[in-house]
Amino acid sequence: MQSHDSTTTSSAPAEGPRTKPTPEQVRRAPKVLLHDHLDGGLRPATIVELAPANGYQALPETDPERLGEWFREAADSGSLERYLETFSHTCGVMQTRESLVRVAAECAEDLAADGVVYAEVRYAPEQHLNGGLTLEEVVEAVNEGFREGERTARARGHRIRVGALLTAMRHAARSLEIAELANRYRDVGVVGFDIAGAEAGFPPTRHLDAFEYLKRENNHFTIHAGEGFGLPSIWQALQWCGADRLGHGVRIIDDIKVAEDGGVTLGRLAAYVRDKRVPLELCPTSNLQTGAASSYADHPIGLLRRLHFRATVNTDNRLMSGTSMSAEFEHLVRTFHYTLDDMQWFTVNAMKSAFIPFDERLAMINDVIKPGYAELKAEWLFR
Ligand SMILES: O=c1[nH]cnc2c1ncn2[C@@H]1O[C@H](CO)[C@@H](O)[C@H]1O
Ligand SMILES: [Zn+2]
C-alpha cells in the first residue's frame, strides 16, 4: 500500500502540505458526500423524542446514549440483511410530516457542522407512509427539512447544499412509481434515484422498467451494487440498467488481480469501470459492519485510489456506523497516510460525480473546494 511517511527524510520539512492533517483540519476541510441514508443518520435523542408522536413503541432502548450503542452493535453483524433490520426503528419514527422535516433539518445541520459542503441524501419514500402521508407529502416534508437545515447551518457560519435521492426498495415492486416521483420533483430538491435493500436475490434488472424510464427522461440514478453481492450485480447495474454511479461497488476488487511482484491486472469489467470513470460510492466503515471488507487496511479503497478509479468516500449510515465524513477520513488518514491532497482528490472526484448541473459542480470545485484546501494547506506557513 501507499506509504510516504514524510517525516523520515532529513531534508523534508517536518510540517507542510504533505504531512498528516490534524483532526481539526479534517473536520474543517470541505467535504462532499454522495451516499448517505436519511433514515440511517438520525440523532439517537431525536429517535427517542419522536417515538411517541409516531406511535412507535418498539424501540430497543429509550436512553439516547444506550440507543446509539444499540444501533452500532446491532448493525455490526457481518451480514447486510441483519444490518438492514435496524432500519425498522428509524423508519418507525419517521411517519409524520413534522418528524420528517425535523430529521431532514438535523441531517443538513449535522453534515454542515462536520464540514460537508455538498451532500446527496437518500431515503425511500415508500417507507414513510404508515402515518397516512402520500408519497408527495413525504418528499415535500423532507425537502422542507433540508432547506430549513441549510438555513440554520448558514446562520451558524456553515455553508451546505443538500439534494435528495429517492430510493426504491429492491425487494418491493414500486420502483417505477418512485422513479416517476423522482422525475416529478427533479428541479425541486430531488437530484436523482437509487435502489437499496438486500442485494443477494434481488438483482437490479428486476427494476429495469424504472431505469429505462429515467433514461428516457434524461434523469440520473445510482444503484446499490457490489456490496452484499459481487460482480454480476455490478455488471447488471452498469450494462443492463445504465447506472451513472455505483452505490458501494467495492466488490469490483474481485475483478482486479495483484501479483506477488505488485503488478496489477484488471478484468474487463474493472477496466470498464475505470476507463469510463464510473464513480464508486465507497463506504469503508459500513463495509466492515456488513462483511464486505475485513479491516480498514484491507479495504479496497487503498488499491482503488492508487489505481485511479473514480473513488469517493462516504458515510452510508452515520447512526448505524457511529461515523461521520470526518471520521471516515480520519480512518483513511491513519491507515493509508493520506494527506490533504488525497482528501482533495476524493472530494473533487465526488463533486465531479454529483447529479447537479455541470456548471454548478465546476463552481463548487473551483470556488469552494479548491480554495478551502488551499487555505488548509497553507496553514503550516503561518504557525
Ligand atoms: O448499505 C446499504 N445497502 C443496501 N441498502 C441499504 C444500505 N443502507 C441502508 N439501506 C436501505 O436503504 C433504505 C433507504 O434509505 C434503508 O431503509 C435501508 O433499508
Ligand atoms: Zn447505502
Image (cartoon, rainbow, N blue to C red):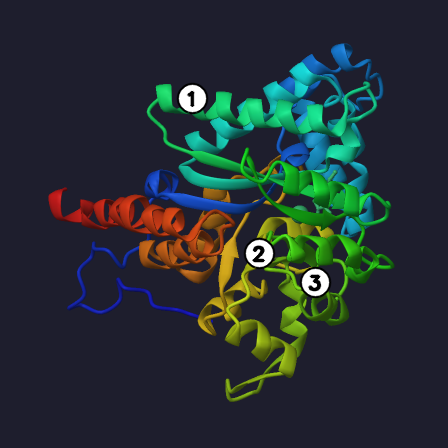
- Measuring from the top left, give residue 157's x and y in whole percent: 33, 25
What residue is rendered at 50% in x and 45% in y?
A: 33
- Measuring from the top left, give residue 342's x and y in whole percent: 37, 59
Residue carrying label 3: 226
Residue carrying label 1: 151
Residue carrying label 2: 282
- View extreme (top): residue: 53
- Measuring from the top left, give residue 48's x and y in whole percent: 70, 16
Q: Nearer the viewer, residue 135 or 152?
A: 135
What residue is rendered at 47% in x and 58% in y?
A: 335
| Image height of 54 relative to 260, above or below | above
Q: Amino acid at mark 2?
A: Leu
Q: Quadrant of residue 266?
A: bottom right
Secondary structure at badge 3 equals loop
Secondary structure at badge 1 equals helix
Q: Amino acid at mark 3?
A: Gly
Q: Quadrant of residue 139?
A: top right
Q: Give the label, 1 or 2, closer to the camera.
A: 1
- Looking at the image, residue 379 sits to the left or right of residue 84; the answer is left
- Looking at the image, residue 192 sits to the left or right of residue 7; the answer is right
Badge 1: how crowded within 10 Å, few (<14), some, or many (20+)? some
